[in-house]
Amino acid sequence: MIKHLWFIGFVVFFLSRCSQPTEDGTSQGGVVAKADSLLALMTLEEKIGQMYQCLGRGHARVGDGEKARDLIELVKAGGVGSILVPGDVHDVEEMQRFAVEESRLGIPLFFNYDVIHGFKTIFPMPLAMSCSWDTALVKRAHRIAAIEASAAGISYNHGPMADVSRDPRWGRVMEGNGEDPFLSSLFTEASVDGFQGDGISHANTIMACVKHFIGYGAVEGGRDYNTVDIGEETLRNIHLPPFQHAIKAGVSSVMTSFNVVGSVPTVAHAPLLRDVLRSELGFEGIVISDFGSVGELIKHGYARDAAQATSQALDGTVDIEMQSRNYHENIKRLVEDGLLDESVIDEAVRRIVIKKYELGLFANPYRFATEKYIDSITLSVPHREIAKETAMKSMVLLKNDGVLPISSKVKRIAILGPFSNSQDILGRWSAKGDTSEAITLLAGMKKQFPEAEINWLNVGDFWENSPLPERKIKDLTRDADLILLAMGEPKEMSAEAASRATLGIPGNQQRIAELALESGNPTVLVLFNGRPLTIPWYQENMNAILEVWFPGTEGGNAIAEVLAGHYNPSGKLTMTFPRDVGQVPLYYNHYSTGRPAASSQYSSKYIDIPNGPLYPFGFGLSYSGFEFSDLIISRDSMKLNEQMEVSVRVTNIGEVFGEEVVQLYLRDYVGEVVRPVKELKGFRKIGLEAGASEKVTFSVTPDMLKYWSPVSRDYIVEPGQFAVMIGANSAEYLEKDFELTN
Ligand code: BGC
């Protein structure tokens, strides 16, 4: 026995010391061989352990005391492969020590966390960041998040979220990149690049896990976890592209979703997971279930019991079960009873262990817990600077009658509303972000306008239409040169399990605005929120509206700089803002219908409101003005093996430097199935001095006209008539037709 242990010890030592992972140049083949050698030493129980992710010991659901001890014993027994939401860096180090020094094979643990928009330094929520239309900026934000998270011991991120959504009722739209598959693909790719840097074996990187595969953004009624019922063409043309891009970028892991697709829960959807994800897209990394979703197969009515749920998820190649213990409790018996081939388990464990090698965890299990750096790097001045820049670039100016930027004549500013001096502006999924580090609007304004008299009132109730201190509001606003209404949704109203059936600014906040308007003084809505809201009343009554979302740690400074005009807003919406919740889902890349609105009385329209949005996809104003002219296409017709150039002239007709996002849309007039009225296929963000103009040129290639057709059951490009549109948003553009020929 002693001899035997000595031998195992030697092999493990040999594996970990002599054959380092890709970090030192070991080939992928070498990593696989090492994983196989390790696999050969593992008992079935140890393999099952690698497939179990449990919550950290400090987590409420595990609790302290007995359960924490249970967890330690489980780790020592090799019964856990990853820990979700670990404690601080000491906790990570200690748990890793139990795994590496006290378990039989010393296999290191992954430490998982949801690093969605920063770790300690919090950036604007992802939907906001996508409004920057600046992928390099988003990559930089996630690079910083990875630097801070990896220093605290995190090795495996549960992000980015790549779910495309057309329904603002769904609270999780705040975690994604909006309604467009093309834009969302670019941001997903940039996010993976940011988290994984030059490769996961490099210092300061964390594994990225793209989620949630798939269709989760299409939950019926926008109600979280609800049924998804979409055709394969929508699945492939709208929901799949960001996942394809994440895989192209080398994402390490994919998380399944909570919903069904085609009446089958995705965590057990073998055709989607095996055939599409693994075979067609070639994904070789780890597939992880979402929190408890293997067990939920029973509630879905797809599995009779936990054993069947286990088999179904394994059949879908789900390698790690998050939080619930179905794998733990059933795999061994299924194998012993001959109902499950151990080779299925081996495949899953091989994928898990390969990533641990690639991360360099065998070479240095503590590489992620670098306590000595934490204080110097987290929330550092440069990180905060980039958080501020990201926040400024994420803001969208929705209306401005000229009251912004704030003129030097403004001496008295009144700030009212629940966000006036609130530090609760990080938004949900803000990892280890600390609200006490956040800069409030009031603090930002005081810093930016030291000469002005700034009065403020924290009034407003998000949840109830309760009475307001009306006299105080009137007193505060009566003599103000400018009123800022810091209003919107509290963070609890967006993200997971926070769907809304109504989309207005909630509670008694509109009354605050009404009282402010009674003063007759210029009034600006500074809107904090996690999703598109229905704000036609504000559009009509405010002098200006600045969409600031949940802007993160540097929020107040960023808003104040934009209001002061030190940064000229350049953000553009990546989700349509409806006029009314009854229009939802409302999105720019819709089909035409056989009876387009206004074609006759019997057309596809509402009788009570216009069809169109309040603010279309791609919309956002600037303190400058931009004129688009001279749309030129290099040819009227191109062959399948050719490409053409399309150019437009953009002129800054305003008085200050500004940035414009020049957007390229294409339309396929007739297809073997109907095609959207337009689809975003390119964009360029340019900066122009006042009076300057620039010719912006795009190449249009047949590849950009490709789509998945349910008739051909393939990706096709069809010869025919097309339109090219270039403009400032999806509703304002110049347009020309061209032909694609064989
Ligand atoms: C969410 C995932 C998340 C996981 C762990 C789940 O409820 O759907 O997105 O990664 O929790 O926090």
Image: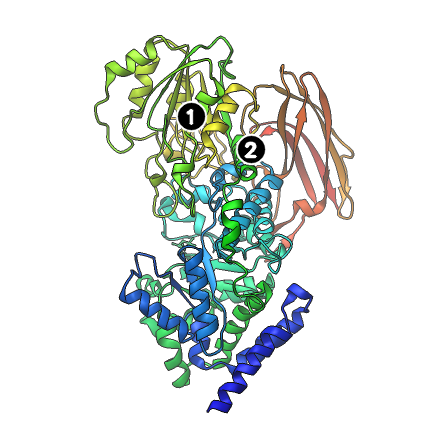
Residue 343: image x %, image y %?
Answer: 51, 80
Estimate the spatial distance between the alpha carbons at disc 1 and disc 2, rounded to whole Å: 17 Å
Residue 63 sits above or below residue 561 on the image: below
Task: Please tell me in which quarter of the rendered image ligand 1 is found.
Answer: bottom left
**Residue at point 66%, 45% (across, down):** 705
Residue 578: image x %, image y %?
Answer: 43, 31
Which element is circle 1 on? Answer: helix
The amino acid type found where label 2 is placed reads Glu
| Total numbered labels placed on residues in the image | 2
**Residue at point 44%, 13% (across, down):** 452
For disc 2, the neighbor class at 10 Å (few under 14, some 14 to 19, many from 20) is many
Q: Which of these two is toward me, 85 or 316?
A: 85
Using the rendered image of the protein, determine whether residue 162 is visible from the camera's viewpoint. no
In the image, taking residue 563 as reference, residue 679 lies left or right, namely right
Q: Which of these two is toward me, 351 or 435?
A: 435
Q: Which residue is mark 1?
A: 443
Residue 301 sits above or below residue 389 on the image: below
For disc 1, the neighbor class at 10 Å (few under 14, some 14 to 19, many from 20) is some
In the image, taking residue 644 as reference, residue 242 lies left or right, namely left
Which element is circle 2 on? Answer: helix
Tags 1 and 2 in contact by the CB under 8 Å rule?
no
**Residue at point 76%, 34% (across, down):** 636
The amino acid type found where label 1 is placed reads Ala
Q: Earlier in the sequence, mark 1 or mark 2?
A: 2
Residue 493, quarter of picture: top left
Residue 333 sits above or below residue 596 on the image: below
| Label annotation for residue 271 | none
Q: Which residue is mark 2?
A: 389
Q: Which of these two is toward me, 155 or 536?
A: 155
Residue 60 sits above or below residue 630 on the image: below
Residue 397: image x %, image y %?
Answer: 50, 25
